[in-house]
Image (cartoon, rainbow, N blue to C red):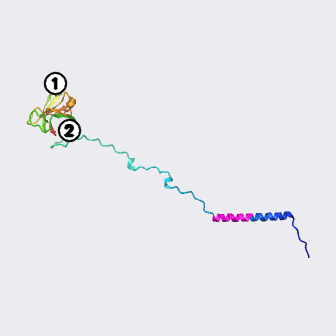
Amino acid sequence: MLYGKRRFPLWAKVAGLVLVVVVGFLTGYAGYTLYRDLTAPPPEMPAEPRPADLPAPPRQLPEHSITPAPLPAPQQPMSPSVPGKIKGDQVWLHVVKGDYRMYLYRGKNVERIYKVAVGANGGQKQRVGDSRTPTGTFSVQQIQKASSWTYDFGDGNGPTRGAYGPWFIRLKTPGWSGIGIHGTHDPGSIGTMITQGCVRMRNHELEELKKMVFVGMKVVISE
């Protein structure tokens, strides 16, 4: 049987051509996408921050630096070494000429420090009138009221009343007489070498000292 050649309409040809193009495009795109996914480098991860980029951590203070510091212990007055033997809590005096200080002790403990003036010349007393304060271990011989006593300093002003202050604490100093602890009419002279051999102190401090002094009290004078 013989058949005649079949002829397709134009729109069918165009539609077939479009379909071939679309299918080819989709097939090619799918292949490209698969290839790209398989060959593309992995995505970059955010870089780890370097130590310099990190914010500084809060500073941790050492434990000892936040502990309150203990309060300093009250300082004891500086005093020279105790000469000789001291019995119990006996009250006694120590005059240190080089420091211009007189220390009131109870036993081996300093209870009071007084600033004083001493002999105009240094060293051990050698003769009468040499203006030196003798050194050694002495004792209180007498306590005399001296507010009415006068002394002529040879300055042309005549006898000066009150030159010895309110009291004269006479010391028993073997070989020498007239040595004692007394006050002054000139408080500005305290802390100097100016006397004829006595120990001079401020009047109000002498009044305080007199309440604690007694006949026979030990008095040490050292350089």
Q: At 16% from the left edge and 24% from the top edge, which residue is drawn?
A: 160
Report helix, strand or loop for mark 1: strand
Circles 1 and 2, Cβ within 8 Å, touching? The answer is no
Point out the image quarter for the C terminus: top left
Report helix, strand or loop for mark 2: helix
Q: At 22% from the left edge and 39% from the top edge, which residue is drawn?
A: 110
In the drawing, does residue 128 fall left or right of residue 186? left
Q: Residue furthest left?
A: 175
Give the residue number, with chain letter if any, for mark 2: 99
Using the rendered image of the protein, determine whether residue 96 is visible from the camera's viewpoint: no
Whether residue 94 appears in magenta in the rendering, the answer is no
**Residue 155: x and y, percent?**
15, 25
Badge 2 amino acid: Asp
Q: Main secondary structure of the magenta part?
A: helix
Point out the image quarter for the N terminus: bottom right
Per the rendered image, the range of residues in magenta is 25-39
Q: CA distance from mark 1 to mark 2?
A: 28 Å
Q: Residue furthest bottom?
A: 1
Q: At 50% from the left edge and 55% from the top edge, which residue is drawn?
A: 50
In the drawing, does residue 194 fall left or right of residue 69? left
Report crowding for label 1: few under 14, some 14 to 19, many 20 or more residues within 10 A (C-alpha). some
Whether residue 34 appears in magenta in the rendering, the answer is yes
Give the residue number, with chain letter if any, for mark 1: 160
Badge 1 amino acid: Thr
Task: Check the image and report above or below for 114 versus 72.
Answer: above
Marker disc for residue 194 = none
